[in-house]
Amino acid sequence: MAQYAVLIYASDSAHAPDATPEDLETCDDHSDDLADSGVMIAAYALTPRDMATSVRDDIITDGPFVDSKEVVAGFYVIEAPDLDAALAIARTNPVVRDGGGVEVRPVHSSYLRPPVP
Amino acid sequence: MTDPAVEAALAAAHRDQWGRVLAATARVARDLDLAEECVQEAYAAALRSWPTAGIPGNPAAWLTTAARRRAVDVIRRERALRTRLPLLVIPEEETPVADQDGTWAATAASAAATPAPPGSPASRTAAEPETETEILRLVFTCCHPALSQEAQVALTLRLVCGMATADIARAFLVTETTMAARITRAKKKIAGARIPYRIPRPAELPERLRAVLNVIHLLFTAGHTAPSGPALVRADLVARARQLTGMLRALMPDELEVRGLQALLLVTDARRATRTDASGRLVRLADQDRAQWDRAALAEAEQLITGCLRAGPPGRYVLQAAIASLYAEAPSYQQTDWPQLVALYDELLRVWPSPVAALNRAVPLAMVAGPEAALAEVDRLDAGGRLAGYQYLPAVKADLLVRTGQPEAAASAYRQALALSANEAERAFLTDRLAAVTGQRADPG
């Protein structure tokens, strides 16, 4: 088994600080499906592009790092035996049929701080 | 010591069997680089051994056994040193490929059921019969959509056809260093991203087969009209493309698009002898000597196409073959069935909405609806911008401008086409056409 990060690209994230459960329904349903199937080991939904701040050459600017039509709206890490299996999981993300897409990257290594008691 | 019979047998085995030997070795080596090294060494060993021991009855099986044995030895030694990790992901269970009557699904499954565990006596001693489908794993891995199309083409030529990196570089107009880097990068991605070494599952097959056929078609196109250089045709690339198609056809006889591609290559290549004159100058389809076309190849293609059209809704390659075949079967260019060609192009554009197909449609359209109507189509495509830099757009446009009595605009379009073409035979042809229209302008009488 290998780990793959799935980066979600969309025109913006649905996860605004004041998002309603209805706004998030599609994302949450898919996340539940992946969690239930046991392939997903971590997931992070990011807030919209308006919340983003970038630093380049020590200069701070408002907005995402790359000025593009799409932003990374979130990412999650899945476990799969090979790239085909990872792509098969990743392409079920609803964003793929909603004008956005996903990028699949093999994970090299990771760190999670152990829970602080 | 050199032995002409041995050299001939080895050359044939290199040309025809490289991919099969490599595919079988890769499964044991679990690493494409190691597999390549072992196959190279097997060929070298054959050169030493065959002159005295005699040429084996089945050279491919001999080479495969030698290459696999070598791979097993390397793996065992390196395992002891713990220096080698398997780099090629070979799925344990293989789902048989969906094929209605299961002709090759069954063999694919049995190929998967007989892996040769490294170090097992079976893999070391056996001249076990390699199933034909083994090579499909290699082909589908080389043409995986996670690799760039450039990389797919390069890997297929290197690994499946055994072509030298320097030759591939020459064929695609890059330096050997660039090509070597491209191949290395692709192999690294196969290992690093874990692109599996297997035949695609039924649900993925249409998409994955399309990628393989595209690579072969690209190879053929690059051979049929060389991107640059003095000769119009690069016979080696044409031969490789035809060889790969023949192989796929034998392995997947029921795939209509494979048959369609084979027919397309047959028809297109049947005209090879007449595409240039004795001095290497390009001859237009209208002026080619139809008596010299390879009639046997055309008949074979015709039969393939008819069978495909009967079997189901035609795909891109079946339709392209039908179009090429319809052009070829007319007794003369003037007697070509133009309305039927336009209809076939319409059908083609439905299954393959490509601007190149739309441009080619302009040729029969000019015969059916007049050059003005075709010119309007070409202008629309030009404005669309998707064919920017495609030399045949200004070339087709120039021809239509001549026919609508606009020599100045035609001359400018021929100059555009010339600026975009690097093939000497094509450039000479375009230069002649340009001279003809500018001459026409200078001498209006």
Image: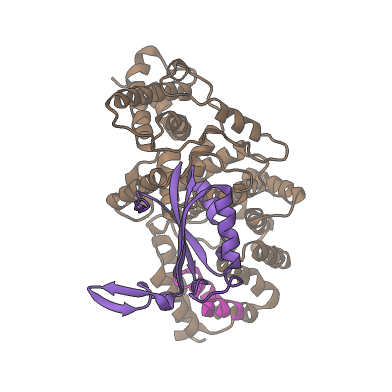
**Range shown magenta:** B376-400
Q: Nearer the viewer, residue B247 or B423?
A: B247
Q: Is B430 left, or right, of A21 in this rendering?
A: left
Where residue B60 appears, x then y in whole percent? 47, 25
Q: Is residue B256 left or right of residue B52?
A: right
Q: Main secondary structure of the magenta part?
A: helix
Give the purple chain's letter. A
Q: Which chain is drawn using brown?
A: B
Q: Is residue B292 above or below residue B436?
A: above
State the image coordinates of residue B3 (x, y, percent, origin top left).
Answer: 35, 21
Q: Quadrant of residue B351?
A: bottom right
Image x and y of residue B2, in percent: 31, 22
Query: What number of labels is visible?
Result: 0
Q: Is residue B271 visible to the viewer in this orientation of the structure?
A: no
- Camera sees residue A87: yes
Q: Is residue B343 magenta?
A: no
**Between B183 and A6, which is closer to the camera in this rendering?**
A6
Residue B358: name its quadrant.
Answer: bottom right
- Residue furthest out toward the front: A117
The residue at 32%/19% (across/down) is: B48
Viewer-proximal residue among B241 and B331 = B241
Q: Is residue B396 magenta?
A: yes
The residue closer to the viewer here, B35 or B418, is: B35
Q: Quadrant of residue A49?
A: bottom left
Q: Considering only vertical position in the picture, is B269 above or below B384?
A: above
Q: Residue at position x 59%, y 82% from top?
A: B404
- Which residue is painted at 66% across and 72% down in the image? B365
The residue at the far right in this view is B310
